[in-house]
């Protein structure tokens, strides 16, 4: 009797596995447990109804659904724009392509160039990135991001004195080097 029960359990388990293999599996979500990356990027940036081409870099780290990164763009009339952002991210594997949705907030510094306001402030960002692997450590992709910021003149953010608020839309192409744990 025990032998028959073992065979029945084994047959049932094999049948359940076979049935499971016939069903489509949901795509992996947040395939990377943790990672660090650095990327070079070229961006078309629209700020205050003016569009410019900028070059820049981004370096960051992510753990599960949280990401922190430093972003710097330079070359446009705004001069050098440096940001430190932290917030949630969501990854979705689309069969060879990776879609990343992110949002966050942090600090921003704008200086140099012909910018009307050179100062420090707060920034909120949201966007989407579509990437494809170019080997084990490199990815190429495109991003569409938007941001809203509030700057005060000088090196420290203040709610008094000269104050400037604005927004931007960024469309960028990038090449990324990433080390991660899956």
Image: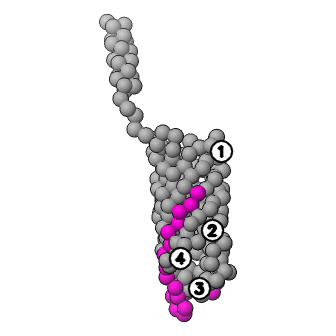
- Circle 4 residue: 50
Horizontal side of 139 relative to 128 (left or right) equals right
Magenta part of the chain: 154-173
Q: Say which of marks 2 and 4 sits in front.
A: 4
- Circle 3 residue: 117
Q: For residue 113, which numbered disc appears in the image?
A: none
Residue 75, image x, y percentages: 66, 72
Marks 2 and 4, how far apart in space? 12 Å
Horizontal side of 4 relative to 169 (left or right) equals left
- Depth order, front residue of 142/88: 142
- Asked which secondary structure carries label 4, the reply is strand
Dot 4 crowding, Cα within 10 Å, few <14, some 14–19, many 20+: few
Residue 137 vertical placement versus 166 (above, below): above
- Circle 2 residue: 54
- Circle 1 residue: 137
Residue 11 appears anywhere in the view: yes
Quarter of the image with the C terminus in it: top right
Residue 130, image x, y percentages: 51, 51
Q: Say which of marks 3 and 4 sits in front.
A: 4
Answer with mark 3 or mark 4, whichever residue precedes in sequence: 4
Marks 2 and 1, how far apart in space? 25 Å
Residue 178, image x, y percentages: 64, 49
Disc 3 to disc 4: CB gap under 8 Å: no
Answer with mark 3 or mark 1, whichever residue precedes in sequence: 3
Marks 3 and 4, how far apart in space? 15 Å
Quarter of the image with the N terminus in it: top left
Residue at x 57% of width, y 49% of height? 34
- Asked which secondary structure carries label 2, the reply is strand
Residue 14, image x, y percentages: 38, 18
């Amino acid at each position: 009797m025990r032998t028959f029960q073992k065979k029945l359990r084994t047959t049932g388990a094999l049948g359940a596995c076979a049935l499971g293999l016939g069903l489509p599996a949901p795509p992996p979500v947040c395939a990377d447990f943790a990672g660090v990356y650095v990327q070079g990027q070229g961006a078309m940036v629209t700020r205050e109804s003016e569009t410019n081409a900028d070059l820049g870099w981004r370096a960051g780290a992510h753990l599960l659904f949280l990401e922190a990164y430093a972003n710097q763009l330079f070359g446009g009339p705004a001069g050098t724009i440096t940001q430190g952002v932290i917030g949630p991210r969501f990854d979705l594997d689309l069969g060879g392509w990776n879609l990343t949705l992110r949002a966050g907030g942090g600090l921003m510094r704008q200086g140099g160039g012909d910018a009307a306001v050179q100062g420090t402030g707060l920034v909120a960002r949201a966007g989407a990135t579509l990437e494809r692997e170019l080997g084990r450590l490199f990815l190429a992709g495109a991003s569409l991001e938007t941001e809203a910021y509030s700057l005060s003149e000088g090196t420290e953010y203040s709610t008094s004195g000269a104050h400037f608020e604005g927004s931007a839309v960024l469309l960028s192409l990038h090449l990324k080097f990433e080390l991660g744990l899956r």
